[in-house]
C-alpha cells in the first residue's frame, strides 16, 4: 500500500503540476510551432523578394545591353534602377544596379547622377569588393573633373583585391598633380601587382613610356 500511495501521490503531483503549468506548456509548443511556420514563411518571402530583384536586374541588363539606347529605354532603365534600389536596397542587385546606373549616367554626360549612384554604393554596400569598384570609378570621375587630391582620398578604401587597379588610378592622380616620380612608382606597382595576380592591366606600360618621353623633353 505504501508503494501504491507513493504512485498515487506521484500522480496527484503530476496532476497538480499540469494544472499549474499545462497552459503555459501548450502555449510554448504553439509558439514554437508558429515560429517554425513563421520562419518558413519568412524564408519563402525572402526567396520571392530575391527572385523579383533578380528578374528586375536581368531586365535592366538586357535593356542596357543594346547598342543604342533611345530615350524610352533610358527612362525605363532609370525606373528599373529605382525599383531595385527602393525595394531591394541591401541586396547584391541594388549594388549592381547602382554601378550600372553610374555607367549609363557617364555615357549620358550626367556626372552628378553618376557620382550620386557611386556614392550610394560606397555608403550602403555590405560588399567590400563592390564598394571598391565604386571607389575606383568615383576616383576616375573625380579625376575627370579635375579633383585629383579628392580622387586619392577616395582610393583609400579600395580593398587589396583591387590593389593593381587602385595603384593605376593613384598614378593617374599623381600625374595630374604634376608629380612624375610618384606617378611612376604607382604605375610600376600596378604592373607588378597585375603580373603577380595574373590580372591583365592594359595601358599602364604606355603611360610609363609616355612619362619617360615627357621627362626627356623637359
Image (tube, rainbow, N blue to C red):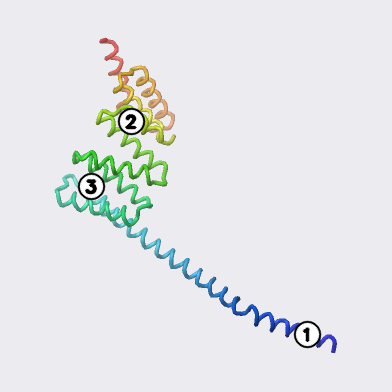
Q: Dot 3, how many residues are within 10 Å of its Cα: few (below 14), some (14-19), or many (20+)?
A: few
- Residue extending farthest bottom: 1
- Cβ atoms under marks 1 and 2 closer than 8 Å: no
Determine whether, in the image, residue 111 is placed left or right of residue 7.
Answer: left
Going from the N terminus, do you reach mark 3 or mark 1 first? Answer: 1
* Residue 182 at x, y percent in the picture: 37, 20
> At 34% from the left edge and 51% from the top edge, which residue is drawn?
93
Q: Dot 1, how many residues are within 10 Å of its Cα: few (below 14), some (14-19), or many (20+)?
A: few
- Residue extending farthest right: 2
- Give the spatial CA distance, label 1 vs label 2: 83 Å
Quarter of the image with the C terminus is top left
Mark 2 secondary-structure assignment = helix
Q: Is residue 37 above or below residue 189?
A: below
Quadrant housing residue 155: top left
* Residue 96 at x, y percent in the picture: 33, 47
Q: Residue under circle 3?
A: 65
Going from the N terminus, do you reach mark 3 or mark 2 first? Answer: 3
Quadrant housing residue 166: top left
Mark 3 secondary-structure assignment = loop
- Give the spatial CA distance, label 3 vs label 1: 80 Å
* Residue 195 at x, y percent in the picture: 41, 28
Q: Residue under circle 1?
A: 7
Determine whether, in the image, residue 94 is placed left or right of residue 12.
Answer: left
Q: Residue under circle 2?
A: 150
* Foreground label between 3 and 1: 1
Amino acid at each position: 500500500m505504501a508503494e501504491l500511495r507513493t504512485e498515487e501521490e506521484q500522480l496527484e503531483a503530476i496532476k497538480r503540476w499540469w494544472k499549474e503549468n499545462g497552459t503555459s506548456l501548450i502555449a510554448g509548443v504553439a509558439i514554437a510551432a508558429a515560429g517554425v511556420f513563421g520562419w518558413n514563411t519568412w524564408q519563402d518571402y525572402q526567396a520571392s523578394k530575391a527572385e523579383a530583384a533578380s528578374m528586375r536586374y536581368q531586365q535592366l541588363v538586357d535593356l542596357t545591353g543594346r547598342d543604342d539606347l533611345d530615350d524610352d529605354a533610358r527612362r525605363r532603365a532609370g525606373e528599373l534602377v529605382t525599383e531595385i534600389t527602393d525595394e531591394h536596397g541591401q541586396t547584391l542587385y541594388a549594388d549592381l544596379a547602382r554601378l550600372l546606373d553610374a555607367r549609363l549616367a557617364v555615357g549620358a554626360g550626367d556626372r552628378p547622377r553618376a557620382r550620386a549612384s557611386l556614392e550610394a554604393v560606397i555608403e550602403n554596400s555590405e560588399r567590400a569588393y563592390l564598394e571598391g569598384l565604386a571607389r575606383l570609378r568615383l576616383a576616375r570621375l573625380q579625376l575627370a573633373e579635375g579633383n585629383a587630391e579628392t580622387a586619392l582620398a577616395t582610393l583609400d578604401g579600395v580593398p587589396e583585391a583591387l590593389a593593381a587597379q587602385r595603384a593605376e588610378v593613384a598614378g593617374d592622380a599623381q600625374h595630374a598633380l604634376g608629380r612624375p616620380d610618384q606617378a611612376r612608382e604607382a604605375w610600376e606597382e600596378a604592373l607588378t601587382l597585375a603580373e603577380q595576380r595574373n590580372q591583365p592591366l592594359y595601358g599602364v606600360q604606355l603611360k610609363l613610356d609616355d612619362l619617360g618621353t615627357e621627362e626627356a623633353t623637359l
